[in-house]
Amino acid sequence: MASDLVRFSVTMPEGLLEQLDAYVDRRGTRQNRSEVLRDLVRERLVDESLEVPDEEVIGSITMVYDHHTPGLSERLDKIQHRHHTEVLSTMHVHLNHDDCLEILAVRGPGHLIANMADCMLGIKGVHYGRLCCVATRDQE
């Protein structure tokens, strides 16, 4: 893999470089500027792939919701069944008497995944939600 690496230089304001170095330090001892920059570029490219209609993405939809909200569980299930091809797996955790955590592993065209996440996370009773996509081997 090292033979595929290409060296290039980046010019940036000193203050921004200091912020980058602080970010590298927070990420841990195994990280360096190059690794962090690669991660940031991959993250941006994955975010952009959600905007390309047929670009495949893989990731998760995480949400915390009040399972006492009338009809909420049924609405979430209906959306998941409508997208059964994109939903690879789910995990459901009872956090307390009222709240549940649900995590869906998803894969499919970015626009479908983003639409599914928007539909689920916008339902009344969902307290928190986030779509997180990761780079596939094709995006390295």
Image (spheres, grey):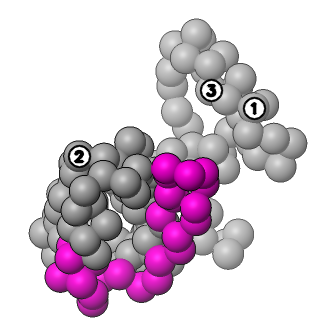
Q: Is residue 22 above or below residue 27?
A: above
Q: Nearer the viewer, mark 1 or mark 3?
A: 1
Mark 1 residue crowding within 10 angstroms, few (<14) / some (14–19) / many (20+): few
Marks 2,1: beta carbons within 8 A? no
Marks 2,3: beta carbons within 8 A? no
Marks 1,3: beta carbons within 8 A? no
* Residue 128 belongs to the span the image colors magenta: no
Residue 17 left/right relative to 49: right
C-alpha span from label 2 to label 3: 38 Å
C-alpha span from label 1 to label 3: 10 Å
Toward the viewer: 98 or 52?
Answer: 98
Q: Point out the tag, 1 or 3, that comes first from the N-terminus.
A: 3
Residue under pointer 1: 26
* Residue 97 belongs to the span the image colors magenta: yes
Q: Residue 124, labelled with which disc?
A: 2
Q: Residue 20, labelled with which disc?
A: 3
